[in-house]
Image: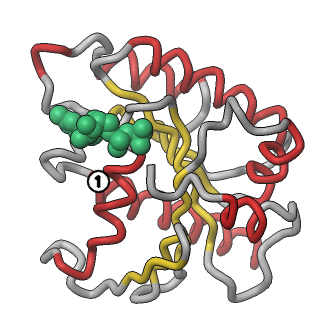
Amino acid sequence: SWSSSDSVISTDSSGEPAEPGSPYRVVLLGASGVGKTAFASIFAGAADTTTASCVQTSCVRGRLRWTGTRPPVTLMDTWDVETESDWARENFLRSADAFLLLYSVTDRASFLRASELRISLRRFRPAQRTPIILVGNKCDLVRRREVSASEGRTCAAVFDCKFIETSAAMQHNVWEAFRGIVRQLRLRRDSEEV
Ligand code: GDP
């Protein structure tokens, strides 16, 4: 995974809220192999795709900055959260503005892992309306599916977050997921300004 770098930890895990005007920090979370790197690559390659022709991206030491639209977003792929210290992990999770919580529809264990991560997030960030989208990736692998869409939807409802199924391989719904998280960040910002 290209961004499992210490630079992400050292520059972005201070636990301090983002400065005004700095990009929103959106973190990709999920078990190994669910497609986080594939997601990040699509985001990074946005300048080459027609879907995102209005979006510029640049890759800064494992961090991806989306500069073409407002509000700008820094997308951060996560390192293997299991192997990090609790301190580093908690600070990283606290410093994020929003999460894309990925599992693979072909891997039930990754679905259970997503639930565990959701519970951890609730512990680190109590009483905050942190935008989270539960993402069931690899929906192109129809014959290997282990988690139905309705299970995903139900889980998202229980966890009070949005839900989408995607295929990074087919580039299906990936931008909808990014757009969804930006929409939620905007809604949250607007409601805070009122
Ligand atoms: P990560 O460990 O979460 O970063 O997962 P990766 O992005 O490295 O993906 C793990 C494997 O799944 C790679 O071989 C990817 O090519 C593959 N993969 C990722 N997303 C999809 C998808 O939507 N459909 C299919 N068929 N394969 C995918």
Q: Quadrant of residue 136?
A: top left
Name the residue carrying label 1: 174
Numbered disc 1: secondary structure: helix
Q: Quadrant of residue 164?
A: top left
Q: Is residue 98 above or below residue 193?
A: above
Direction from residue 58 to residue 82 in the image, left or right:
right
- What residue is rendered at 50% in x and 21% in y? 155
In the shown orientation, is residue 105 left or right of residue 121? left
Q: How many marks?
A: 1
What x and y, as percent, mark residue 54?
A: 27, 87
Q: Quadrant of the C terminus?
A: bottom right
**Mark 1 closeness class: few <14, some 14–19, many ≥20 residues within 10 Å:** many
Task: Say whether residue 182 is visible.
Answer: yes
Query: In the rendering, at what x and y percent does residue 26 appear?
Result: 57, 60
Q: Residue at x 86, y 64 (%)?
A: 14
> Who's the residue at 76% across and 53% down the image?
92
Q: Amino acid at mark 1?
A: Val
